[in-house]
């Protein structure tokens, strides 16, 4: 079993070698920004969101904390925690592709989406 610090390094290197722009916040490897592009076939396509990632000391045994730095209008976005690599490969694309008005975190976005989908989009 690898140490938590090795998990930081491996996952961060995977992100840096992928299509994502990664920018370190400090000298350590625990806080950084990732530029995330809206997925194709979603209303977010063409948009770019800066995601702040903070890896806990116990990562990967404890989930990272991630959050949108720039605003995004989405009924299910407030705060996100998940496995680091899956956040960018699976979770964020699915979040932007499959809106869930039955579990809203942003009431204003949800109300507009339900009442006037064209205005929301």
Image: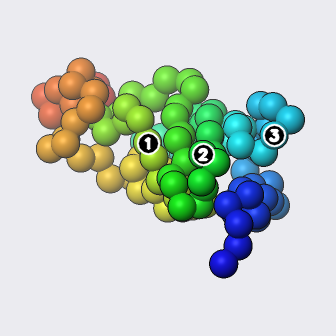
Q: Dot 1: within a 10 Å radius of its alpha carbon, few (fewer than 14), some, or many (20 or more) residues?
A: some
As measured in the structure, the alpha-carbon distance from the residue carrying label 3 to the one carrying label 2 is 12 Å
**Residue 55 image point, x, y percent:** 63, 46
Residue 10 point in image, percent of width and height = 76, 64
Mark 3 or mark 1, whichever is nearer to me: 3
Q: Nearer the viewer, residue 74 or 103?
A: 103
Please give the residue where the numbered disc 1 appears in the rendered image: 80
116 with respect to 63 (left or right) = left
Element on which disc 2 rests: loop
Residue placed at 70% from the left, 73% from the top? 2
Tell me what residue is drawn at x 39 percent, y 50 percent: 95
Per the rendering, the mark at residue 61 is none
Whether tag 2 and tag 1 are in contact, CB under 8 A, the answer is no
- SS of the residue under disc 1: strand
Residue 75 shows in this picture: yes
Is 89 left or right of 74, judged from the image as shown?
right
Q: Which residue is mark 3?
A: 28
Q: Are marks 3 and 1 in contact (CB under 8 Å)?
A: no
In the displayed structure image, the side of residue 113 where residue 55 appears, left or right: right
Q: Between residues 93 and 22, which one lies in front from this camera angle?
A: 22
Q: Quadrant of the C terminus?
A: top left
């Amino acid at each position: 079993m690898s140490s938590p610090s090795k998990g930081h390094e491996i996952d961060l290197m995977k992100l840096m070698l992928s299509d994502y722009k990664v920018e370190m916040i400090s000298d350590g490897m625990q806080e950084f920004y990732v530029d995330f592009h809206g997925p194709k076939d979603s209303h977010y396509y063409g948009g770019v969101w800066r995601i702040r990632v903070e890896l806990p000391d116990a990562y990967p045994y404890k989930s990272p904390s991630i959050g949108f730095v720039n605003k995004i209008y989405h009924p299910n976005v407030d705060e996100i925690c998940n496995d680091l690599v899956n956040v960018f490969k699976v979770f964020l694309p699915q979040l932007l592709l499959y809106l869930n008005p039955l579990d809203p975190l942003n009431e204003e976005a949800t109300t507009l989406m339900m009442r006037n989908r064209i205005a929301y989009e």
